[in-house]
Image (spheres, rainbow, N blue to C red):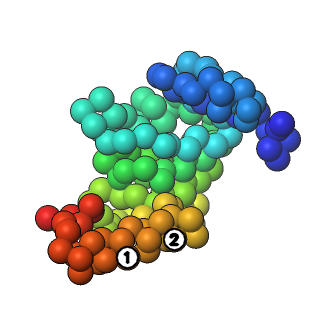
Amino acid sequence: MEPFNSRLLAYEISPDADFVAHHAVEIVTLEKLLTESDFVSLHIPSNAQTKGMVDAAFLAAMKDGASLINTSRGDLVDEGALLEALTSGRLRGAALDAFSPEPPDAGNPLLALPNVIPTPHMGAHTDGAADTMGRMALNDCLAVLHGDPPSNRVI
């Protein structure tokens, strides 16, 4: 199975073998992923190891003319380095669903670039996710009405 007649490369520390096999994903080194991919899409949490990982060196290692997609967390990306890579033509474009800070400042220069597609951190708002969130909220309302604590307490 090759979606869009494309190879799917992934860098993953603990790959799910069944998922990889079913979706014909090729697990590669980060270096190979960056140098061979036309699109690099981030799907990682923000933590001490990943914060700022998409820096000038990471972007320089990407294939010329590639695009970056970030639907994860804004603090993964050094926005100054990304701005440089985009304005120099090194990268073709970026689709950014997350910024640091969030929401981005109105004067963020990335927002003014024609080769940047910004979205308001809504990448996870699929029909399935909205249904699940609605059911969770309803179940918590019913629990409280019955005198029970909610499962998903917001503090």
Q: Is residue 10 above or below residue 78?
A: above
Q: Does residue 153 appear to the left or right of 94 in the view shown?
A: left
Circle 1 is placed at which residue position? 138
Query: x and y percent of residue 40 in the render?
Result: 58, 40
Quarter holding the C terminus is bottom left
Q: Label 1 vs label 2: CA separation?
A: 11 Å
Query: x and y percent of residue 151 in the render?
Result: 27, 61
Query: x and y percent of residue 69 in the render?
Result: 54, 50
Q: Does residue 43 appear to the left or right of 79 in the view shown?
A: right
Q: Does residue 105 appear to the left or right of 96 in the view shown?
A: left
Q: Is residue 112 above or below residue 83?
A: below
* Numbered disc 1: secondary structure: helix
* Numbered disc 2: secondary structure: helix
Q: Is residue 139 visible?
A: yes
Residue drawn at (49%, 71%) of the image? 130
Q: Does residue 27 appear to the left or right of 14 in the view shown?
A: right
Residue drawn at (66%, 27%) of the image? 18
Q: Between disc 1 and disc 2, whose residue precedes?
A: 2
Circle 2 is placed at which residue position? 131
Viewer-closest of 18 and 85: 18
